[in-house]
């Protein structure tokens, strides 16, 4: 029997069970429900006996008992970086079923043969709560998680509160729940809005975080209730150790940013994008902030250009000295407000996630977008429109890292780890290598773990070598033990699982890449052996005042990164050999 919440209107309704403490299921106790949800109901979970029976079937796949390590093995495992592979966007269909379960099983086995540690998957809000408010249906995801578990892989999950479609690489369309969009039809200002009035239906605006517009619930309550239901219905998978990371979606594409560069509205690389704060709720917030600052006459920017402009096409971002709006008192006030609202938004949702998954042996994570174009322009225009107030004399990422640190060290997951400056068009003034170095350094300085993924699909050894360099920027540490290298990412997530990845020379190169990420060690099932033990999630520290967070904007030089990895998967010669082997196999196959 599939565990789910309310697949039909006639389902019995009960209150949510308490979620604090251990991840084990407990009997419902309405007196323990927090006041914020005590008056609301959600559709019922299946009978405990059914869940217990299924839980027995989905208990963890037995892992071989670890053998004692010799000194050299321990030294090398201190350099081990686990590799996860992102599952296809459409792995769960609109009908809430696993797409081609047996085909997926075969792919997962190929990943295990390659030594991969686990997989990552989106958990789409639009699928699970699509039937109506608080009617959660987890059928497809329980089937998927069971399949992943049976194949001996670990799992990273994304709480995907955004729509799929309209972003780079989106090949499918999964909207946010229809009943939420119905609210948006009556009140379009629940969506992020461009200066020209274009609404973006990918994610709800920050402006409605605390407004009870959604059948009596606020946006924050929508996200929190979804996560509570996930914890209750996936308790057996959490308890078994299958799920190791929960990445909390905080914006478009699941990233902590504004939807400043939507392809669905005509944006094309390397356009600067547009600010997305022109819905009535954020406009009202800005006016109140400006009035409190003694400048009630200030308005939102009207000089920041169009989606596909270059910075110097605009008055706001122009590099012609003090005349640029972003350098004026008004511009600095706006950018501080705009970026601070984003940090506050992420902080609120992560605080809910931490409270909900308290006691579970998982790490929380948040994704920050790798906006590398116009990084070498004085204005960093594309970063600014996305909400990252990052300039030559101001670190826009360290406050984000400091905010994440309070949530029991939530992981900062950053993109574009595969990119090199030399691969980018000169006119884009792009610097992916420098932005990766800056953001990872900011995370390490704030004492949190950082993780990486590639932004675009790549199968070549050049991209693999760049990811390896960023994973261990100072190379393999042979000093041994003691917590591993000073600077090593927590995990690498490879984008994404395809048939192409698992065939021919691409599969051979990928297997070598995984081996090198593992520091030439065999697959290790126990994270404690590579110094990333899973511990029960502890409660977030008290909220940090914004002025304290913004103290982190004082720039510091990033940590030094080596020019190339010391664990290369090979270069041009290896690519040539791959090509020759493929040809031979094709001729004689």
Image (tube, rainbow, N blue to C red):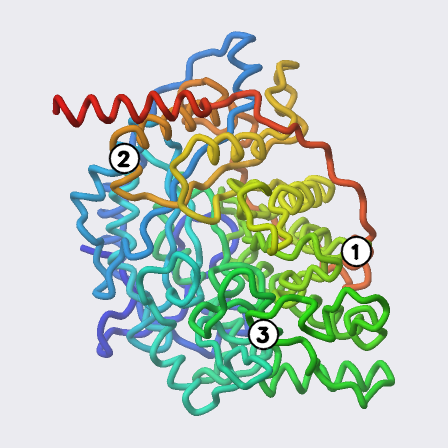
Tell me which residue sits at (41%, 88%) in the image.
185
State the residue in front, 523 or 348: 523
Q: Name the residue under label 3.
A: 206
Spatial distance from mark 3 to mark 2, Cα to Cα?
Answer: 40 Å
Closer to us: mark 3 or mark 1? 1
The disc, 3 or 2, on the residue closer to the chain's N-terminal end is 3
Tell me which residue sits at (57%, 25%) in the image.
565
**Pointer 3 with pointer 2, Cβ within 8 A:** no
Q: Mark 1 points at which residue?
A: 394
Q: Which label sits on residue 502? A: 2
Tell me which residue sits at (82%, 54%) in the image.
393
Secondary structure at badge 3 equals helix
Quadrant of residue 194 in the image? bottom right
Q: Would residue 320 appear left or right of 265 to someone viewing this image?
A: right
Spatial distance from mark 1 to mark 2, Cα to Cα?
Answer: 43 Å
Q: Would residue 76 appear left or right of 383 to someone viewing this image?
A: left
Residue 470, relative to residue 317: is it above or below?
above
């Amino acid at each position: 029997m599939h565990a789910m919440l309310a697949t039909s209107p006639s389902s019995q309704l009960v209150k949510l069970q308490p979620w604090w403490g251990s991840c084990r299921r407990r009997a419902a106790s309405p007196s323990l429900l927090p006041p914020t949800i005590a008056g609301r109901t959600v559709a019922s979970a299946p009978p405990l006996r059914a869940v217990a029976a299924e839980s027995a079937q989905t208990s963890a796949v037995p892992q071989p008992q670890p053998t004692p390590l010799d000194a050299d093995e321990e030294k090398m495992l201190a350099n081990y970086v686990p590799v996860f592979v992102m599952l296809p966007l459409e792995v769960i269909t609109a009908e809430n079923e696993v797409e081609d379960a047996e085909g997926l099983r075969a792919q997962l086995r190929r990943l295990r043969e390659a030594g991969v540690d686990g997989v990552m998957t989106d958990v789409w809000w639009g699928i699970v709560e699509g039937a109506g408010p608080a009617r959660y249906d987890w059928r497809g995801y329980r089937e998927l998680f069971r399949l992943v578990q049976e194949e001996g892989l670990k799992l990273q999950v994304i709480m995907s509160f955004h729509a799929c479609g309209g972003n780079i690489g989106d090949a499918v369309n999964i909207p946010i729940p229809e009943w939420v969009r119905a609210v948006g039809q009556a009140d379009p200002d629940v969506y992020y809005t461009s200066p020209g009035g274009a609404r973006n239906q990918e994610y709800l605006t920050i402006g409605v975080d605390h407004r009870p517009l959604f059948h009596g619930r606020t946006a924050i309550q929508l996200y929190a209730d979804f996560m509570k239901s996930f914890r209750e219905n996936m308790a057996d998978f959490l308890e078994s150790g299958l799920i190791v990371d929960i990445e909390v979606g905080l914006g478009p594409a699941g990233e902590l940013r504004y939807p400043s560069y939507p392809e669905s509205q005509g944006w094309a690389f390397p356009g600067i994008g547009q600010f997305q704060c022109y819905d009535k709720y954020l406009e009202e917030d800005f006016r109140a902030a400006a009035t409190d600052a003694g400048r009630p006459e200030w308005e939102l920017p009207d000089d920041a250009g169009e989606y596909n402009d270059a910075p110097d096409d605009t008055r706001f971002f122009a590099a012609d000295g003090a005349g640029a709006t972003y350098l004026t008192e008004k511009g600095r006030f706006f950018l501080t407000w705009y970026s601070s609202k984003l940090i506050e938004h992420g902080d609120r949702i992560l605080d809910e996630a931490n409270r909900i998954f308290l006691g579970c042996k998982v790490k929380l994570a948040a994704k920050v977008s790798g906006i590398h174009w116009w990084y070498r322009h004085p204005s960093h225009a594309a970063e600014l429109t996305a909400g990252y107030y990052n300039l030559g004399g101001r670190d826009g990422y360290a406050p984000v890292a400091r905010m994440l640190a309070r949530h029991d060290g939530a992981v900062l997951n950053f993109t574009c780890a595969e990119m090199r400056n030399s691969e980018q068009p000169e006119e884009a003034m792009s610097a992916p290598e420098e932005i990766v170095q800056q953001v990872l350094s900011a995370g390490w300085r704030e004492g949190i773990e950082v993780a990486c993924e590639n932004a675009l699909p790549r199968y070549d050894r050049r991209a693999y070598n760049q990811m390896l360099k960023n994973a261990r920027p100072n190379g393999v540490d042979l000093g041994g033990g003691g917590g591993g290298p000073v600077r090593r990412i927590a995990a690498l997530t490879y984008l994404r699982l395809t048939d192409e990845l698992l065939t021919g020379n691409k599969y051979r190169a990928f297997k070598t890449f995984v081996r090198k990420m593992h520091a030439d060690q065999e697959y290790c099932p126990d994270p404690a052996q590579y110094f990333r033990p899973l511990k029960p999630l502890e409660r977030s520290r008290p909220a940090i005042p914004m002025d304290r967070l913004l103290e982190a904007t004082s720039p510091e030089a990033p940590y030094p990164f080596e020019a190339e990895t010391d664990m290369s998967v090979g270069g041009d010669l290896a690519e040539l050999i791959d090509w020759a082997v493929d040809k031979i196999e094709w001729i004689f196959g």
